[in-house]
Image (cartoon, rainbow, N blue to C red):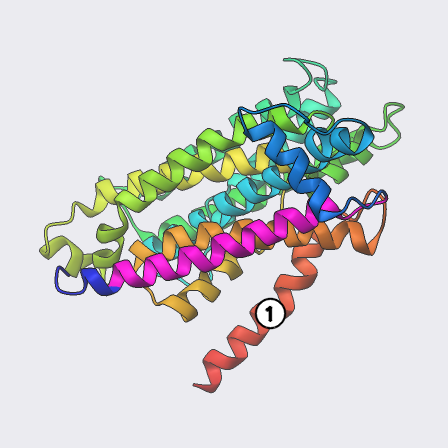
């Protein structure tokens, strides 16, 4: 692996530079577009005034409020969520040796959905400064991951196939419990059922989006660094579990670490945005086809690709149904499902 390091560095640098530019373009367009159109130059002036130590002549007025207090944090939240889901998907596909795996395979989404449903019905919207629902969703998501891991673990090791099956079974059971919660919420005067469904469809439209950005950012940064540090081990693991073990990889420890990191990252993403599908499934496929399967390149570029796709999806959601927009989860499904079917068709043709 040492001999190909310069080649890997070049591919990583090229991929990151291009994708960083795409993310920047997506964010600027997302911030500029809306019921109140704000010229790109005005967007740049507002952003520059907030990130610069020089505040003289800083823009003010309605445009500045719209850009910095509403649209910019929404775009950044979309980028963070997309990055977390995509990097988690890339790592899980490498660990589970299954290109169809995504961050929701481990049952995190169903656990978060159940937690959000229970919290909404219990009226916890105003708890913890208004973030009671995301907090409970996060706790339930982590709990679901532990249940799946415990079910899949036998004789001191976790079988990849057992883990996938456990994720499907536990996830299905938790979705059944959520259906029960929805049925109990039917006709609730507080419209709890509608709130639950809205959360399940995914959205970046928050009352105070900067708070959600501050919550999500540490998980995204730590998750990226942690997953990238295990990229070489994932490369060896992708050759097969037995081969990786012979090459000195503690495979069981690697499984625990990758499952824990991806579950935490996914739980954070789902807790702040609801369930947004296909990002963690499609983006790693695109990056793998364009830049190769090496996880040292795949994980960071998947994060940037996921960020770009999530921001563009947010932009598309508001363009399709202005001004509030469609739930982003619907947009990603509309974009992701046909593309993934295309990928399957191409792979079969080969």
Residue that appears at 71% across and 37% down: 71
Count of marks overlaid on the render? 1
| Residue that appears at 14% across and 53% down | 245
Outermost residue toward the front? 56
- The answer to whether residue 328 shows anywhere in this view is no
- The quarter of the rendered structure image containing the N terminus is bottom left
Q: Nearer the viewer, residue 135 or 321?
A: 321
Identify the secondary structure beneath mark 1.
helix
Magenta segment, prevailing SS (helix, strand or loop)? helix
Residue at the disc numbered 1: 339
Up-down: is 6 above or below 71?
below
Please rate how many residues cluster around mark 1, counting C-alpha atoms within 10 Å: few if below 14, some from 14 to 19, many from 20: some
| Image quadrant where residue 278 sits | bottom right
Magenta stretch encompasses residue 162: no
Q: Position of residue 240 (x, y in %)?
A: 23, 62
Side (left or right) of 221 relative to 44: left
Percent position of residue 270, x then y: 58, 38
The C terminus lies in quadrant: bottom left
Q: Residue 331 placed where, x, y %?
A: 71, 55
What x and y, as percent, mark residue 186? 84, 33
Question: Above or below — where is 331 with respect to 228?
Answer: below
Q: Is residue 28 magenta?
A: yes
Which residues lie in the magenta part?
8-35
Q: Is residue 170 visible?
A: yes
Quarter of the image for residue 271 reads: top right
């Amino acid at each position: 692996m040492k001999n190909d390091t310069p080649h890997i560095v070049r591919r990583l640098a090229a991929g990151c530079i291009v994708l960083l530019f795409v993310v920047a373009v997506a964010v600027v367009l997302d911030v500029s577009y809306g019921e109140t159109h704000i010229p790109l130059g005005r967007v740049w002036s507002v952003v520059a005034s907030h990130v610069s130590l020089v505040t003289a002549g800083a823009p003010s007025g309605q445009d500045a409020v719209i850009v910095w207090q509403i649209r910019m944090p929404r775009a950044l939240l979309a980028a963070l969520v997309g990055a977390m889901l995509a990097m988690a998907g890339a790592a899980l596909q490498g660990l589970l040796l299954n290109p169809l795996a995504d961050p929701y395979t481990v049952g995190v989404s169903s656990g978060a959905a159940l937690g959000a449903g229970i919290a909404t019905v219990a009226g916890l919207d105003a708890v913890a400064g208004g973030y009671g629902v995301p907090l409970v969703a996060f706790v339930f998501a982590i709990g679901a991951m532990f249940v799946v891991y415990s079910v899949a673990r036998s004789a001191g090791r976790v079988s990849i196939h057992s883990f996938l099956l456990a994720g499907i079974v536990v996830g299905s059971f938790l979705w059944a419990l959520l259906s029960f919660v929805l049925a109990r919420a039917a006709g609730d005067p507080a419209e709890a059922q509608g709130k639950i469904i809205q959360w399940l469809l995914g959205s970046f439209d928050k009352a105070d989006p900067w708070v959600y950005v501050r919550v999500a950012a540490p998980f995204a940064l730590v998750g990226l660094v942690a997953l990238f540090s295990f990229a070489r081990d994932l490369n060896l693991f992708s050759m097969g579990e037995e081969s990786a073990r012979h090459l000195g990889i503690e495979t069981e420890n690697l499984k625990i670490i990758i499952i824990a990191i991806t579950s935490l990252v996914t739980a954070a993403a789902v807790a702040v945005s609801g369930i947004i599908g296909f990002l963690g499934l499609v983006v790693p496929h695109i990056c793998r086809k364009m830049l190769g399967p090496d996880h040292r390149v795949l994980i960071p570029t998947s994060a940037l690709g996921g960020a770009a796709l999530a921001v563009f999806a947010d932009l598309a959601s508001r363009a399709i149904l202005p001004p509030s927009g469609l739930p982003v989860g619907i947009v990603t499904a509309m974009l992701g499902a046909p593309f993934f079917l295309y990928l399957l068709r191409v792979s079969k043709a080969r």
